[in-house]
Structures are given as structure tokens and as C-alpha cells.
């Protein structure tokens, strides 16, 4: 059973400056929820109980969002807005939250290495706080089911849509052992179409056993000053040593990369169109705007 997850949420969000000078990019709203809440809710739906969020110097708003509401807010909402108060209280009780400030070199392996002492000797989920995959069943639920069936680490994957994707994501190569499941032999970061081992992009999330932490620690001890600590490099070392990882094409998946301005805007529109209350009016507005 997988009970723990680590969310990397320490990035500066430079593509959204000046908005992210004081607001974490993970707290940018998608309708009435911040991005990171969608990810937390999906983790909880997959059975996660303990969530470690690795943050940066200006990320206190994340901690505040998942904390119990203060008395001033409670008093303001009691009575006519009781339903809103219950929703806010529910957010604080979604999981057991722990927070850490990131320290060490840049790179997507550093947040995970920072949280290593809180993981213990059990499998866990590692994911990011500014992108997500919508799927049915949920992405994490699908990954957990595959891990429970095989006991092997799992990378969430999607198929490349266009040439630009090959310059944005890492790609996995290996042997397909069942439909949509690849036994990974290589991971290549942003290879371009000609250098990609397949069209299966590794995005957003991972299930690991604790063995990955030793590889990250070894890489960090060898890292030249100024270099980034790469999770992909640690995974490749693990694979080269004979350990297995599976690339899993998430079923019924839509990937939302909300760390990019255009993709963030598309996410708001797409989820707005799906909303029962907002969808019809938004669809009519878009039709009117595009028709004018």
C-alpha cells in the first residue's frame, strides 16, 4: 500500500512574473481552486495519507491554504456561508501535511532528496505542484494499481502530440510488455524528435521504491558545482544497475502543463467548459467572441 507522497513546489515561477513575485505559481487559480489543490485531491483519492510539500522562500501561502481557517474567517463564514466554511475545513483535513524548504543544488531531484528522511522504507509517489493529468480513473489510482500488481516503480506517461513536445519532456525507451506498459531501458531528457527513443513522454509523476534515494544521494555527492541534480540521471543509473522501472501510458488522459502561460490559459478554459454552472455561459461567450 502506498501512503506517502512528495510534491515539489519550490520553483520560482519566472514565466509568470510579476504575478509570482509574491504568489507561488502552484497557488495560481484554476476556477476556484489553486493548481496544487487539484493534485492533492487526486493523491488523496488514490489512498495517500501523508503529503510532504517541498517549498521555497516565498511559498508560505501553500501552507496557509492547507491549514485550519483562522477564527476571523470562521466568524465571517458562519451562518449564511456555512457551506463554504465546511469546504475550507475539509481542505485542511485532506491529509497529514508536512512542509520543508528546499536546500541544495537546482534540479528536479533536489526536492525528493530533501524529503528522503521522511519517506522511510516504503514506496511513495513523487510529483510536481504545477502540472497534472486528468484521467478516469485518476492518474495516481492507475499508477498505484500497476505498482501493486508488479511491485515495480512507475512513471506516468503520455504520447507526444507534436514536434514541440520532444523539446519539452523526457522520453522513455524500452520493450512494451503489455499494452501501454513499457519496461524502461533508457530515459532521454528533451531529445528532439530525431533523438527520442519513442513517442512516450514521461511527465508529471512517479512511483518509486526507496532505492531511488540512494542513487540521488550518490549523484549529489559527485555533482560539480553549479550543475543541476537530475532525477532522470538517477533513474538511468538505477536502470543500468538492473533495477526495473515501468513507463505507463495513463488511460483516458489529458495533460495540463500549467507552468506555461498558454497552457495555463487553456486549462482554465477547458475546465471552465466542463463546469456544470460556468460551462454553458462560457461556451456562449466564446462563441460570441470568436464570431465577432
Image: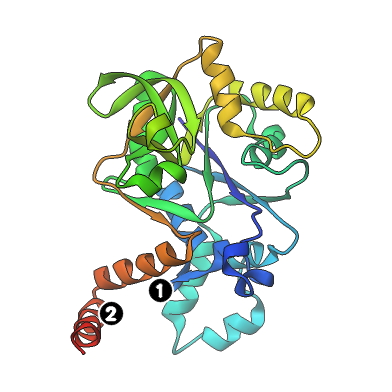
- Report whether 127 appears left or right of 17: left
Q: In percent of the image, x 23 and y 74: which residue is there?
A: 276
Indicate the position of residue 243 as horizontal and vertical percent values. 50, 13
Q: In percent of the image, x 68 and y 71: which residue is there?
A: 21
Residue 129 circle label: none
Residue in front for this viewpoint, 38 or 237: 237
Quadrant into which the C terminus falls:
bottom left
Tell me the quarter of the picture where residue 214 sits. Answer: top right
Describe the colour scheme in one phrase: rainbow
Secondary structure category for the residue under label 1: loop
Q: How many marks?
A: 2
Q: Do the residues under discs 2 and 1 have CB atoms within 8 angstroms?
A: yes
Indicate the position of residue 123 as horizontal and vertical percent values. 53, 28
| Mark 2, other Cα within 10 Å: few <14 / some 14–19 / many ≥20 | few
Residue in front for this viewpoint, 82 or 284: 284
- Kindly give the residue lying farthest to the top in the view shown: 242
Q: In percent of the image, x 55 and y 25: which residue is there?
A: 235
Q: Decide: is 168 above or below 68.
A: above
**Residue receiving disc 1:** 31
Q: Decide: is 112 above or below 59.
A: above
Secondary structure category for the residue under label 2: loop
Q: Could you tell me if residue 66 is visible in this image?
A: no
**Considering only order in the chain, which callout, 1 or 2, is on the residue closer to the N terminus?**
1
Q: Decide: is 40 above or below 212.
A: below
Q: Decide: is 44 above or below 201.
A: below
Q: Could you tell me if residue 32 is visible in this image?
A: yes
Indicate the position of residue 22 as horizontal and vertical percent values. 68, 72
**Residue receiving disc 2:** 278
Residue in front for this viewpoint, 11 or 71: 11
Amino acid at each position: 500500500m502506498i501512503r506517502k507522497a512528495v510534491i515539489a513546489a519550490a520553483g520560482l515561477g519566472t514565466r509568470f512574473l510579476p504575478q509570482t513575485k509574491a504568489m507561488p505559481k502552484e497557488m495560481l487559480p484554476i476556477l476556484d481552486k489553486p493548481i496544487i489543490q487539484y493534485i492533492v485531491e487526486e493523491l488523496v483519492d488514490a489512498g495517500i495519507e501523508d503529503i510532504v510539500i517541498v517549498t521555497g522562500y516565498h511559498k508560505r501561502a501553500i501552507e496557509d491554504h492547507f491549514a485550519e481557517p483562522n477564527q476571523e474567517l470562521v466568524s465571517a463564514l458562519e451562518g449564511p456561508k456555512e457551506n463554504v466554511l465546511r469546504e475550507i475545513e475539509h481542505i485542511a483535513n485532506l491529509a497529514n501535511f508536512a512542509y520543508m524548504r528546499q536546500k541544495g543544488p537546482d534540479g528536479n531531484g533536489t526536492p525528493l532528496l530533501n524529503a528522503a528522511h521522511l519517506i522511510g522504507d516504503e514506496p511513495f509517489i513523487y510529483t510536481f505542484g504545477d502540472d497534472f493529468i486528468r484521467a478516469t480513473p485518476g492518474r495516481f489510482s492507475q499508477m498505484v494499481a500497476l505498482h501493486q500488481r508488479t511491485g515495480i516503480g512507475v512513471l506516468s506517461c503520455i504520447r507526444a502530440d507534436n514536434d514541440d513536445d520532444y523539446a519539452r519532456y523526457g522520453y522513455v525507451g524500452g520493450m512494451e510488455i503489455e499494452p501501454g506498459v513499457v519496461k524502461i531501458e533508457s530515459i532521454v531528457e528533451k531529445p528532439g524528435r530525431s533523438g527520442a527513443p519513442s513517442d512516450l513522454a514521461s511527465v508529471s509523476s512517479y512511483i518509486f521504491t526507496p532505492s531511488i534515494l540512494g542513487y540521488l544521494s550518490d549523484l549529489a555527492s559527485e555533482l560539480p558545482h553549479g550543475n543541476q541534480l537530475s532525477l532522470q540521471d538517477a533513474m538511468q543509473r538505477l536502470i543500468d544497475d538492473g533495477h526495473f522501472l515501468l513507463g505507463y501510458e495513463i488511460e483516458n488522459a489529458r495533460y495540463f502543463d500549467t507552468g506555461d502561460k498558454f497552457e495555463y490559459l487553456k486549462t482554465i478554459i477547458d475546465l471552465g467548459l466542463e463546469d456544470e454552472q460556468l460551462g454553458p455561459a462560457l461556451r456562449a461567450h466564446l462563441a460570441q467572441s470568436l464570431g465577432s
